[in-house]
Image (spheres, grey):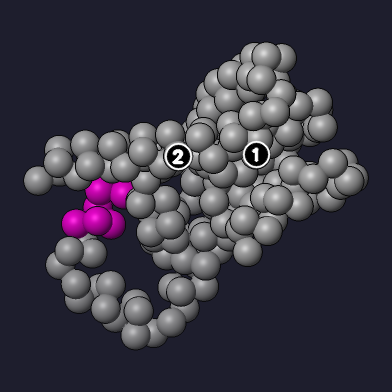
Amino acid sequence: MIAELQTWLTSANTSLTLLCVGIVLLSYLLEDLAIATAATLSANGDLLPSLALMSIFIGIATGDLGLYVLGRYAQKVRWLRYRALTNTSFKVIRQKLTQRAFANLFLIRFIPGLRTIGFTLSGFLAIPLPVFFSAVLLATSIWTLLVFTLIYQVGSHVFMSLSELKWLLIPVAFGLLFLMNRFLNKSFTRGMS
């Protein structure tokens, strides 16, 4: 499904509206792939960088908000609340997450593997929505702009010189982001033990 969505996005017959919607949907599945695809489309001239960035940002922000809302609804499930209250590990996690909520949520955005659980727990623990959303928006802005700009700049140079290989930038960029995420995850978990 992801490959089909990406193929559809990179075909030349797609309208701007559908490109933007496709990028939003792709960001729900794989954020880094959505950023790489949007930057490549922009570097190729198929989509304005501002529209690409807006689409990525909307997709990532609404996805993160969806995880928060999921956590809020999970809080209403009686057996989950009971398990959370009686689990000693959960007490430690709750204390760490709520103690410096903004800073911790900001860092979670950059640590692969913690986003889903961290943002869902934020809703479950009823971290104030303004604190959650401001931390997530700031971190998302920094990450998206950094990765998008890097891929866009590389893509612009690749398109000028090697137009027949231009679409290889998406899998190469995604692969590098995947490896970087794995490295960061291993580095972070090593520091926790």
Question: Position of 77 compared to 95: left or right?
Answer: right
Give the label on residue 165, or none. Answer: none
Q: Is residue 76 visible?
A: yes
Residue that appears at 79% across and 45% down: 11
In this view of the protein, which residue sits in the foreground, 117 or 32?
A: 32
Position of 178 relative to 74 (above/below): above
Quarter of the image for residue 145 reads top right
The N terminus, quarter of image:
bottom right
Mark 2, secondary structure of its residue = helix
Residue carrying label 1: 37
In this view of the protein, which residue sits in the foreground, 71 or 181?
A: 181
Residue that appears at 17% across and 64% down: 89
Type of amino acid at the residue the image marks with label 1: Thr
Q: CA distance from mark 1 to mark 2?
A: 12 Å
Q: Is residue 97 magenta?
A: yes
Q: Residues within 10 Å of mark 1 (few under 14, many from 20)?
A: many
Predominant SS along the magenta part? helix
Residue carrying label 2: 175
Q: Position of residue 30 (x, y in %)?
A: 54, 51
Quarter of the image for residue 155 reads top right
Mark 1, secondary structure of its residue = helix
Magenta span covers which residues? 92-101
Position of 100 relative to 78 (above/below): above
Question: Position of 185 compared to 12: left or right?
Answer: left
Residue farthest along the bottom direction in this orientation: 79
Question: Position of 75 compared to 100: left or right?
Answer: right
Residue that appears at 36% across and 38% down: 179
Q: Residues within 10 Å of mark 2 (few under 14, many from 20)?
A: some
Q: Position of residue 154 (x, y in %)?
A: 59, 19
Residue that appears at 54% across and 40% down: 171
